[in-house]
Amino acid sequence: MASSFPSTSELVADARRLYGQVFGEEAPLTAVCAPGRVNLIGEHTDYNQGLVLPMALPLLTVVVGHETSGQDVTVVTATKDADEPWRVDFSLASDESLCPGLPSWANYVKGVIQHYRAPPVPGFRAVIASSVPLGGGLSSSASLEVAFYTFLQQLKPDDGDKVSKAIACQQAEHTHAGVPCGIMDQFVSVLGREGHALLIDCRSLEATPIPLADPSLIILITNSNVRHSLTGSEYPMRRRQCEEAACILGKASLRDATMKDLEEARNRLDDITYRRARHVIEEIERTYQGTEALKRGAYKEFGKLMVESHNSLRDLYEVSCSELDELVSAAMDVEGVFGSRMTGGGFGGCTVTLMKAHAIDRAILHIKTRYSGTPTFFVTTPSAGARTLSLP
Ligand code: GLA
């Protein structure tokens, strides 16, 4: 059986309950949410100005809260997997209070305040609740950043520009979490659309919604429930290798390079740099092809590209791990499965599988039997981006 996850209203109810416990009688006035994401294809292409095709998830982060008259901030998280303490208090009067530190979950909040586009923000009290698994590669951090930014917009509106909002949240991740991520996660958390995946051109920052609401289809997320500590150092290293490759090829980014360019420059690149660049150039092309296939309802073709993407991430980009490889190969055994691949940064986290709806029970059973670890399953649908919620 796939795991059930709390609905938006259940999360809001949890957050409100905690708000009442922490702050006494006072009821929160504002409630907002922002989703996590799963990337269907286009991995490690965003910071190369390439194409990505993620969708927003029904797994999301909720923030409820209340403006206060002074400059004091109190934020409490209901997320039990977050590092303790689950409550932070600081004053906006001091710049130092926005410096990154511990607990690490609060850094996303501080980063978003720091990069908020209509400073200064007033004091507030807020509670966070989330159904996005922490560290599962489904962008729990981007959903927290974007939810928090959306919360601040209710207290003190900015100009409402959505792309700039995504960029501000990405900056929060860079400065306060120390992860030099691309724009994909924050972008789709802001701009996701129900019933659609989003083709994002990370060079022009244009997004095209791609319909994905065929009832005969299921998008299954399988959490490997492992996270190797490599992510922290390997991600920035991949980014540097790509920049180096683009530089040797004389291009502003790998988006501008073709396989012909790469082959011609092969003797000027070491083997690792060549393989990293090859993954990116081919993955951008696969994302383009995959989007066209999806538009035509050619799911088999899309599935084949998903597997090619996975194999390239495993062999050329070297960001997969044995657990993700096992999950993909188990999913591909099942009749009715079109394709499967690791999703997100890699080194653990989740796979995404596209399949015929009727194959779901068999697929889950088979993957469970074959996987050496303990997987968790989410059957998901493309969902809306960040929004305000009404409080009853
Ligand atoms: C992480 C980053 C994204 C993207 C993916 C890999 O999720 O946050 O910007 O680079 O890895 O596609």
Image: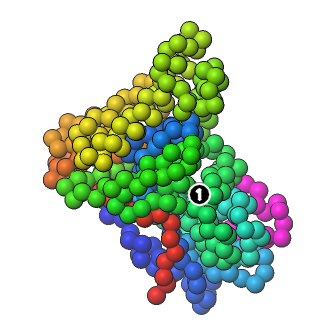
Q: Quadrant of residue 66?
A: bottom right
Q: Is residue 100 magenta?
A: yes
- Could you say which is closer to the camera, residue 279 or residue 249? 249
- Could you say which is closer to the camera, residue 48 or residue 335? 48
| The furthest residue to the right | 94
Q: Residue at image x 63%, y 72%?
A: 153
Disc 1: which residue = 163
Q: Residue at image x 19%, y 49%?
A: 356
Q: Quadrant of residue 167?
A: bottom right
Give above or below for 298 relative to 172. Answer: above
Answer with left or right where residue 96 lies relative to residue 303. right
Under circle 1, the secondary element is helix
User: Where, quadrant-wise, is the N terminus in this rendering?
Assistant: bottom left
Q: Is residue 125 visible?
A: no
Q: Quadrant of residue 267?
A: top right
Residue 275 x, y percent position in the rendering: 49, 21
Residue 43 x, y percent position in the rendering: 46, 39
| The furthest residue to the bottom | 25
Answer with left or right where residue 281 lies relative to residue 197. right
Which residue type does callout 1 highlight?
Val
| The furthest residue to the top | 267
The count of marks equals: 1
Range shown magenta: 85-101
Structural crowding at the residue carrying mark 1, measured as other residues with C-alpha within 10 Å and reported as few (<14), some (14–19) or many (≥20): some
Q: Residue at image x 49%, y 77%?
A: 389
Q: Is residue 156 magenta?
A: no
Q: Is residue 206 visible?
A: yes
Q: Is mark 1 within 8 Å of ligand 1?
A: no
